[in-house]
Image (spheres, rainbow, N blue to C red):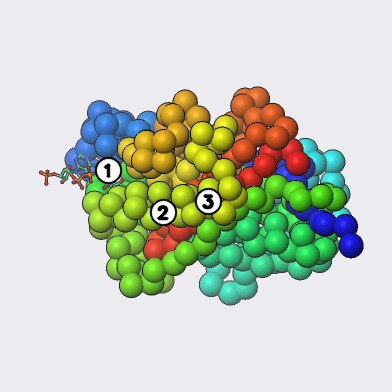
Amino acid sequence: MTELGCAISGWGAALPPTVVTNTNLEKLFDTSDQWIVERSGIRMRRAATGPFVEATPLAHPPGGLGTTSALAVEAGRRALDSAGATADEVALLVLCTTTPDQAIPATSAAVAHALGTGGGAMDLNAACAGFTYGLVTAASMVSAGIGKVLLIGAETMTSVTNWEDRTNAFLFGDGAGAVVLQPVSGPGSLLGWDLGVDGSLVELLYADHGSGMVMKGKEVFRQAVRATVDSATTALRQAKVSADDITLFVPHQANQRIMHAVASRLGIPVERIASVIEWTGNTSAASIPLALIDAADAGRLAAGDLVLLAGFGAGMTWASAVWRWGA
Ligand code: UT7
């Protein structure tokens, strides 16, 4: 039997139109652009909801970008177009999100309906590690013969932001990034991976139903660096490659200081990091696809290049993947 691999054949991103700068946030709580930039590297983020988005139904009419599903649909449509694929060719839609539109049903149902995808659809919640969890899951299913998968990371983090908590409200933003995964003959793209979770760390970052996020920032920072370095190292070892072989490092965009600390410990030069955090903030499961897509659109990737994706998030979860571009 011929070996079945998996390749990324198209991608697309979507951001809500409202830009919230650090200076805008000075109206909500005691902070400054300088403090936020120094501590996080974030200058602005996009918001689908919250105090800077007009709270009128007309602000987000059907087809607007005010919900996780709307952002996911837009990114998914662009990814399908760029792959030259039609919606009915999709065998599975995986929506990675920690901010679903509703508790029931899964938001992927609405996204599948709006796009008209075939096959199944499911949500995957591994918080900020979600997209990499989804990539490993979806690539494995493509290799098992399921067909094409539309993999989307989409979030409205502003809907779970506590706008009175200056210690973390400045970190988060909204957006979506999507890729089409399709079968290819041969070994394909997923060369190594690592998935993990430590539920004893739940209290570091959580949001109860109907209330805003609570985060112990300093401890999350410490655990994030440790978990991401360990996880990426495991994935590199499994792929039998070294950090020197990595053309593009796509870390979860949580804090520029975390991204730089992880890259430095792995021995990856700063120039090889894919970064959009300056203008998107932390978009949770959308952050890695947004950074990957930005790098791909900027021509930073050629066929055969090795990409290292590494995310961590609430749970605590972590996930890494070594991916051969354009296989
Ligand atoms: O997807 C995973 C999500 N989360 C993360 O990755 C977050 C990880 N953690 C972080 O990124 C950092 O911990 C933060 C950026 C959230 C905070 O940076 P920090 O260097 O850990 O700052 P800190 O919490 O130790 O606060 C330092 C000072 C404090 O004042 P004192 O106690 O030193 O007088 C804070 O009260 O800065 C103060 N502070 C602020 N000042 C201005 C806290 N928030 C703000 C603010 N503006 N927004």
Q: What residue is shown with label 1?
A: 28
Which kind of residue does numbered mark 1 sit on?
Leu
Callout 2 crowding tier (Cα within 10 Å): few <14, some 14–19, many ≥20: some
User: Which element carries disc 2, helix, strand or loop?
Assistant: helix
> Distance between the Cα atoms at labels 2 and 3?
11 Å
Q: Are marks 1 and 2 in contact (CB under 8 Å)?
A: no
Q: Residue at x 56, y 35 (%)?
A: 245
| Residue ID for mark 3 | 237
- Residue 267 on image: x %, y %: 41, 36
In the current view of this chain or complex, which residue is farthest to the front?
240
Where is mark 2, residue-wise?
230
Looking at the image, tell me whether mark 2 or mark 3 is earlier in sequence order.
2
Q: SS for tag 3? A: helix
Residue 271 to residue 237: above or below: above
123 on left or right of 207:
right
- Mark 1 or mark 2: name the one nearer the start of the chain: 1
Q: Residue furthest right?
A: 1
Question: Residue 18 placed where, x, y %?
Answer: 49, 37
Q: Nearer the viewer, residue 47 or 153?
A: 153
- The image shows residue 325, relative to residue 317, as above or below, that is above
Q: Nearer the viewer, residue 266 or 30?
A: 266
Residue at left offset 48%, top offset 50%: 232
Q: Where residue 209 sits: x, y (%)?
A: 41, 71
Amino acid type, callout 3: Arg
| Residue type pointed to by label 2 | Asp
- Near-viewer residue (139 or 45): 139
Say whether marks 1 and 3 touch (CB < 8 Å).
no
| Left or right position of 129 against 148 | left
Q: Is residue 128 visible?
A: no
